[in-house]
Structures are given as C-alpha cells and as structure tokens.
Amino acid sequence: MSCLLRTPLLRIPFIYRCALSQTQHTSPKHPSNVIPDPRSVAILVIGDEILKGQTQDSNSYFLCHRLRLYGHLVTRISIVGDCEFAIAAEVKSLSARHSMVLTTGGIGPTHDDVTFAGVARAFGQPLVEHPELLSLCQQFFGPSMPGSPHLKLACVPATATLNYGHDPTTGDRLPFPVVSVGNVFVFPGIPALLERSFEGLEHLFRNGSQTISTELYLVSDEVSVAGVLSEAQAAFTDLVSIGSYPDWQSNYHRVKVTVDGLSKYHVEHAKRWIVERLPSAAFIKLETRPELVAEERVYALAEKDSELGGRVREALNIINATLSQHLLSELSLAFNGGKDCTALLHLLHAALCRKFPTKKKSLLCLYVRQPESFPELEKFIEQTCHRYAVKLRVLEGGLLESLAEFRNSNPTVRAVLMGTRATDPSGRNLQEMAPTDPDWPQFMRINPLLNWSYEDVWAFLRSLHVPYCVLYDRGYTSLGNRRDTERNPALRYKKPEGIWSYRPAYTLQQSDQERTSRKERP
Ligand SMILES: Cc1cc2nc3c(=O)[nH]c(=O)nc-3n(C[C@H](O)[C@H](O)[C@H](O)COP(=O)(O)OP(=O)(O)OC[C@H]3O[C@@H](n4cnc5c(N)ncnc54)[C@H](O)[C@@H]3O)c2cc1C
Ligand SMILES: NC(=O)C1=CN([C@@H]2O[C@H](COP(=O)(O)OP(=O)(O)OC[C@H]3O[C@@H](n4cnc5c(N)ncnc54)[C@H](O)[C@@H]3O)[C@@H](O)[C@H]2O)C=CC1
Ligand SMILES: [Co+2]
Ligand SMILES: [K+]
Ligand SMILES: [Mg+2]
C-alpha cells in the first residue's frame, strides 16, 4: 500500500480536495488552476426566505442525496437572496468552476422571482419571450394580455434549452420543461415541484462513476477516536474521505464514521486500517434499519431455546391468533411511545410482514397524549410511526373520554393491542385477552407482553437494535409526563470527574424499582 500511496500516477485525486483548491483558500499542495473534476457539481439555492430563516432549505439536501446516487459529487452549495446581481455573480463564478450548476427557486411570476434575469446577466444575454414556453403558459393559465404576471415564466435567457422530463412511473412527458443555459439548470423552489422536475430528468443527470461509501458505528466518543481518524485520513490522503459524526439521539452508537472514495479497494482498506487500530469494544455492528429485517430476526429469536425466545414465541402466538380472528381494520395498537409498546410494535410489524408478504397493510395506532408530555417522547412517536409506516390517531384529554371518542370515530375497531405487563399497576389481574371493564368503552384488550419482565423488554429491544425513546438512555425507566416522572435514583452515579449522571434504563438491576420514579395517579 505504501508504494501505491507514493506513486502519484496511481492516485485517484479525490474530489473534496480539488474543491478546496477552487476557492480562495488555496492550499499550497493544490494550485488554484486545477481543472474542475468532471463530476463536481454546485447547487445555488435562491431565496430571501432562506436567508431570513423563514424557510428551511430542503432542496439542497434532496439534490445532494440524488446527485450522489447518480455518481456526482456536490462540492459547493451557495445561497443567495432574490437579487438579480447577486444571482448573476454567483452563477458566473460557479458555472466556470463546476461541471454543472443546479439552481432552485425564483422562477415564479412575482417581483421577487428574478432567477432567469440573473442567469441571463451572468451569460451576458438578453431575456427573451420563448414561443414554446409562451404557448405552455397560455395552455396552463389561459390567454394572456401583455404584462400578465405569468408571462414572466416564459421570459428566459436567449440561448435557453428546454429539457422535458418524464414521469418515472407512467413514462408520460411532464408538462413543463426545466430551462438550462450552458451548464446551468434552473429548477423551481417549491420542493415537490423541484423533486418531480429533477426525477423526470434522471437521464440527464446520471453519471457513470459511483462513490463507494461505508460506515462504522462507534460506542465510544469522538475524543477517543480522533487521533486514529486523523492518522487514517493522513495515510489515505486523496484516496478516501473520512467523516466523523456524533449522534446524541441514537440508542446504540455515539459516533458514525464514514469512509468514502472512488475505489472499493481503498475504501475497504481504510476501513480495516481504522478497525485494526481501535479496540473491538469501541464498535457496534449496528442494524440501522431493524424494521426491514424484523420478520427474519424476530422469528429467528422465537426459535431460540432461551427465556427470551419463549417470551417472543408466546407473544407471536397471541398476535397471530389475533390476526387470524380479526381483519386489520378491526385492530389498533395503543402506542404511547413507551418501551413496552415499542417492543410490541416491532413484534406486530414482524407478524404483519409474515402474514402479508407482498401487500403493504397499514396499522392504526392510538395515542392519548397527556398534558406536559416530554418533547423527546413526541419526537420519538412521530419518527416511529414514520419508520413502521403506521397511521397515528392522536387524542388529547382524559383516557376514558379519549377512548370513547376513538370508539365513536373508528367503529370498525374491535380489539386494541397493548404493551401492558403483569407487573404494571394496571396489569395485575389482567388476562392476555380481556374485554375492557363495563364502565369503559368496549374493546377487546390484547396483551401479548403480559408475562414479559422488565429485563425481557430490554433484551428484546437491545438485541434487535430497535430504536426506543432516548429518555430511557438518560435515566428514565418508566415514562409518564414531565410533571409526574423523574429519572430513576437507582441509576444515579458519580462519574470519575466528580459529576453526577444517570445510567441507561436497560442497566437497572432491581426491576421492581422500575416505577419508583413515577408519582402514580391516585
Ligand atoms: C385501549 C385501552 C383500554 C383500557 N381499558 C381499561 C379498562 O377497561 N379498565 C381500566 O381500569 N383501565 C383501562 N385502561 C387504562 C389502563 O389500564 C392503564 O391505566 C393505562 O393504560 C396506563 O397504563 P400504565 O400507567 O400502566 O402505563 P403503561 O405501562 O405505559 O401502559 C401500558 C400500555 O397501555 C397502552 N397505553 C398506556 N397509555 C397510553 C396512552 N396514553 N395512549 C395510548 N396507549 C397507551 C400502551 O400500549 C402501553 O404499553 C385502558 C387503557 C387503554 C389504552
Ligand atoms: N408547473 C411547473 O412546472 C412550474 C411552475 N412554476 C410556477 O412558479 C411558481 C413557483 O416558482 P418557484 O421558483 O418555486 O418560486 P419561489 O422561489 O418563490 O419558491 C416557492 C416556494 O418554495 C419554497 N422554497 C424555495 N426554495 C426552497 C428551498 N431551497 N428549500 C425549501 N423550500 C424552498 C419557498 O419558500 C416558497 O414557499 C409557482 O407559481 C409555480 O406554479 C414555475 C416553474 C415551473
Ligand atoms: Co494500499
Ligand atoms: K416568489
Ligand atoms: Mg423565491
């Protein structure tokens, strides 16, 4: 490898370095006259609302992601306001230094939409009314008088090319073309419109080469790996690009390290280089999308001759019996973001994947939000529903009234799956299948986790890398609301540097203390 590294001809110049040399911050190693890499692309985001903090730019994120899939490397994102001169200056500079420039925003009919004027100015061209665009505008907006606002959409730089995209699913030609001038492509700002226009032009933007990317997940913090990562980047200069990204929300890792490059050989080599220099306990082989492998992993766990295997078998039996007795439209999952119903959702998802292997069936979840609920919990619930593609019905107010409302608005639902365990205050005299009490709205309650222990729930979640609410990693063992829940004192400990902290919930030794940090309702 060292010979390889020393032979300049065999080095693949890595793009991110070249990008640096194109800016004013010229590095001594890279003269400023480096020819732009043919894959280097710039994105120009246009809009006052972005600079004012009124709109969060999502278009550049979308474009970076897609362009990378298509084999390009975005080396610059610029943001300018709705100012013709600023747009012109930026377009001129970016267009000279990159193989392609994609702009977003500023092509509508209002006074602040000046992107075409800016692009025309950048190339020293007049704005002209394009006959084909004019007839399209008249088709969409009806016949026009001179000066009609929508005619502005037809006024483009003189050498403009019209690029018609196609709907990737139907193959139909899209009604409105994307205008390009030289290597500058002018996209709309409305995210849905931008995405549709871009996807329709895949053939224009797909490039041959591909960036190879791999990840390492670390359970240790950045400080403890910074030295090795610097050495790795130095050893593989110009061959790979190494990134380090701390994550405060993950339940399973603290840092994600990425290794990117043009050659699989060098990417793998650099990855091994890092792995060999850190203790193996520093890494976790993380399942980043556990929901995609839920069926396989959950059923494999059920085959195991262990206590947890037995619990999983039992829960799957109850779930499958429920699925054979009821249509999916007759079922709902009571989901409040707690660890138990999180485990149940994963089990249910696995069972549904097995029962409906091809059809995407969506489950209805019911969440009765408490006053002063934890923001972390709300965020987790939202992300989880998205992850498992379930519908969420949120109700506010008392449990009884909310259930009555749910009963009325969802008359098909007969049974509600719940994460109740026998050790919960409400689980003491419960059966696995039990109708609600006479004074409660009538449902069949299904409790597949009734015989699970606190430890079973954590062993299940942790072994399958199922994401759970981050509050459990911060010392909460049972979640109510911000008023009635505290971190569990049994998890409190003093760090070597003398600061008090809390261990994660899954390390609690005395599971009978699970709820001691919750003031129970009378
Ligand atoms: C559908 C349903 C039917 C009920 N029927 C009765 C009844 O017949 N008689 C009775 O005395 N009590 C009933 N309850 C109240 C229940 O027994 C508990 O008191 C209540 O769920 C709080 O449970 P917990 O404090 O043990 O919390 P948890 O341990 O958090 O709750 C256990 C499980 O209940 C579900 N759950 C709890 N709170 C919510 C919420 N806010 N939104 C959505 N799901 C939630 C989840 O599946 C959770 O895993 C019912 C609750 C629900 C959600
Ligand atoms: N049918 C079509 O294909 C076309 C329609 N038009 C028309 O032009 C108008 C819109 O032109 P635009 O250039 O899109 O106008 P614009 O620049 O004013 O943006 C429109 C909306 O998109 C949001 N937006 C802009 N940049 C964004 C970013 N980077 N990230 C997230 N959100 C962003 C803005 O905040 C704004 O709400 C509409 O009236 C549309 O009908 C324009 C071109 C093509
Ligand atoms: Co080598
Ligand atoms: K506008
Ligand atoms: Mg705008």
Image (spheres, rainbow, N blue to C red):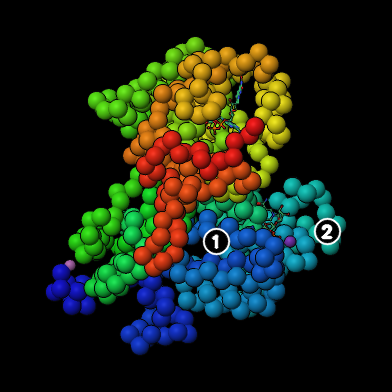
Viewer can see residue 314? yes
Q: Is residue 70 left or right of residue 116?
A: left
Q: Looking at the image, in which quadrant does ligand 1 appear?
A: top right
Q: Please identify the residue farthest to the right as the structure is shown.
A: 145
448 or 120: which is nearer to us?
Answer: 448
| Three-letter amino acid code at the position of disc 2 | Ser
* Figure check: 55 above or below 347: below
Residue at 61% x, 43% y is 484
Ligand 2 contact, mark 2 (Cβ < 8 Å): no
Q: Residues within 10 Å of mark 1 (few under 14, many from 20)?
A: many
Q: Quadrant of residue 121?
A: bottom right
Residue at 49% x, 16% y is 431
Q: Quadrant of residue 222?
A: bottom left
Q: Quadrant of residue 51?
A: bottom right
* Figure check: 197 above or below 300: below
Residue at 55% x, 25% y is 426
Q: Is residue 170 left or right of residue 406?
A: left
335 or 92: which is nearer to us?
Answer: 335
Mark before the other along the chain sequence, 1 or 2: 1
The kind of secondary structure element at disc 1 is helix
Tell me the tag on residue 60. 1
Mark 1 or mark 2, whichever is nearer to me: 1
The kind of secondary structure element at disc 2 is loop
Image location (x, y in percent) of residue 20: 42, 78
Ligand 2 contact, mark 1 (Cβ < 8 Å): yes
Mark 2 lies on residue = 148
Q: CA distance from mark 1 to mark 2?
A: 31 Å
| Three-letter amino acid code at the position of disc 1 | Ser
* Figure check: 37 above or below 379: below
399 or 291: which is nearer to us?
Answer: 399
Callouts 1 and 2 close, C-beta under 8 Å? no
Viewer can see residue 387? no
